[in-house]
Image (tube, helix red, strand yellow):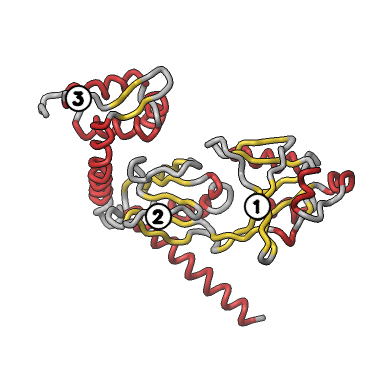
Amino acid sequence: MPNNHDESSLDLLSIFLAVLEAGGFRAAARRLGLSSSTVSERIVQLETQLGVPLLIRTTRSVTPTETGRTLAARISPLLAETRAALHDAASSQREVRGLLKINVTGAVMVDILPPIIDRFLQRHPEVRVEIMVDDRLVDIVAAGCDAGIRYGEHLAQDTIAVPIGPRQQRIAWAAAPSYLAARGAPQHPDDLLDHECIRLRFSSGALVAWQFERGDETVRVDPPGRLIVGVDGVSAAIGLACGGRGIIGTFENWLAPCLQSGELQPVLHDWWTEFEGPQLYFSSRFTSAPLRALIELVKEERIASVSSTRRGEHRN
């Protein structure tokens, strides 16, 4: 590959991976802070240098050629290792320095991750943090991220996961007193088919499933939903539920303020579903200094939380 080209090979390869991850030139350009034409030009430049096409372009999609797919699979871990090395170099001083980039589901952005990041920034003033909010199950390495936060995702063999936030969470259902006074409260999950329901939809297009558990019994219902809101608008959906527009099901911790104020009342409480809390996951091979600092903070808070719980149990 010639050495006198305008753009470094590393930059061109990073742009190539960004296009594959984003699924197109426009989305990659937004992520990279470049124009679509610039991204397209850089891909052409890389293909010219290599002498082979890497992408198949149509008016509706961009997909890799076989050569492009093979190249992406080989360079993704190499670029991740390079980023980790650069992060460590930036963090080699007494203070932890550099960029921490994490890919997270929107579910942790309401009340779990923000206070943790706030404490992390206070402790490490020389660190910059970029949070990519994405409800798709993306490859964190291919996305150029140090780590990800997900619920119950199947982890690759070389991936480590540590709990972040609550160990256990629940999906709860609730409705406004005015709605329940007018329509009555459902006694069984199947009764929801006769109620006005507020459903949430992932960015992938799939509706958030409504699954109920009580003892050994599991029931899944799929009410049509008079109102469907994207998960990014969950606060508005909760507000509409408080206004009497129907029954909503989502994270209990999201509904807790309205349940405590009386704006919402529990529905089908015996059927609320419990599940494992979120996990911070990352490659066991590439751990930057800022990421190690975040892991340390998360583990410290976990130990403090367990100790506090035990002291409370001892007093009782």
Amino acid type, mark 2: Leu
Label 3 sits on what residue type? Val
Q: CA distance from mark 2 to mark 1?
A: 24 Å
Q: Quadrant of residue 67?
A: top left
Q: Secondary structure at mark 1?
A: strand
Q: CA distance from mark 3 to mark 2?
A: 33 Å
Quarter of the image that includes the N terminus: top left
> At label 1, which amino acid type do we have?
Gln
How far, Cα to Cα, is label 1 from label 3? 49 Å
Residue 236 visible in rendering: yes
Residue designated by label 3:
52
The quadrant of the image that shows the C terminus is bottom right
CA neighbours of label 3 inside 10 A, class few (<14), some (14 to 19), many (20+): few
Residue 7: which quarter of the image?
top left
Q: Residue at x 48, y 41 (%)?
A: 136
Give whichever of discs 1 and 3 has the lower sequence position.
3
- Give neighbour class at mark 1: few <14, some 14-19, many 20+ (Cα, 10 Å): some
Residue 298 image point, x, y percent: 44, 61
Badge 2 crowding class, 10 Å Cα cut-off, few under 14, some 14 to 19, many 20 or more, is few
Instruction: Look at mark 2 in the image and give the residue it sits on.
Output: 155
Which residue lies under the disc numbered 1? 211
Which of marks 1 and 2 precedes in the sequence? 2
Q: Tell me which residue sits at (24%, 40%) in the image.
A: 75
